[in-house]
Image: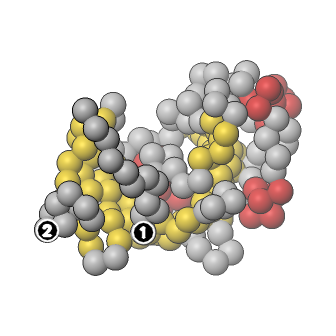
Amino acid sequence: MNYIEPQAKVVHFETMSGILTVERKNDTYEMSLPIRLPEKLDVTAEISDILGFSPIELYSQRDLYAVMESEEAIINYSPDYNKLKKLDKWMGIVLTTKGSSCDFVSRFFCPELKLEDPVTGSSHSSLVPLWSEKLGKTELTAKQLSRRGGTLYCRLCENDVRISGSAALYLHGEILI
């Protein structure tokens, strides 16, 4: 949209989650994601030990969602990837809590790759319905608290979750075939 088709307002991506649509809106991009409703889990001693803390609540979808008591706890969390790998039922581990300067905050860890994703749109397809229900609203502002971090403007719609924000250029180059 910036280099190949600057006149394009909408693009579609074929992904493992289906076709995702991105719409340019001035300086931001809005992505439509499928809703993934998380299911509440019991907090067990085993999961608490693996996480290194006892979450207030746990939810399951594609990822494991652990609700923590404060932003500070999320910011200060240091993952033990060797332990987190034991939670192999889920693709990622998401820490979340109510935000102080936004509606909710999160961090996303991928134990298999031993890394933290800076801003994870896909985890918000479960975070948005979760926090929408908790806060009683469908338009939410979220912050991902990774080192690079990012702010996401989220809407829970009838058939999807819409997430918008600015995009960071990852790579610019030329491929010769």
Residue 163 appearing in the image: yes
The x and y percentages for residue 18 are 27, 36
Q: Position of residue 158 (x, y in %)?
A: 27, 55
Q: Is residue 137 left or right of residue 143?
A: left
- Kind of element beneath mark 2: loop
Residue 159 shows in this picture:
no
Q: Judge whether 9 appears above or below 125 on screen.
A: below
Depth check, front residue: 147 or 33: 147
As displayed, is residue 87 above or below residue 36? above
Please report the residue visible at 54 percent of the width from the left and 55 percent of the height from the top. Answer: 119
| Quarter of image, res 155 | bottom left
Residue 5 appears left or right of 176: left
If the image is split into quadrants, where does the C terminus sit? top left
Q: Earlier in the sequence, mark 2 or mark 1?
A: 2
Q: What crowding class fits label 2: few (fewer than 14 Cα within 10 Å), some (14-19), or many (20 or more)?
A: few
Could you tell me which residue is drawn at 55 percent across and 65 percent down?
150
- Count of marks placed on residues: 2
Front residue (pair 56, 170): 170
Residue picked out by circle 1: 166
Depth order, front residue of 144/57: 144
Instruction: Say which residue appears at 61% left-offset and 62% top-offset.
Output: 149
Amino acid at circle 2: Gln
Q: CA distance from mark 2 to mark 1?
A: 18 Å
Please name the residue that numbered disc 2 is placed on. Answer: 7
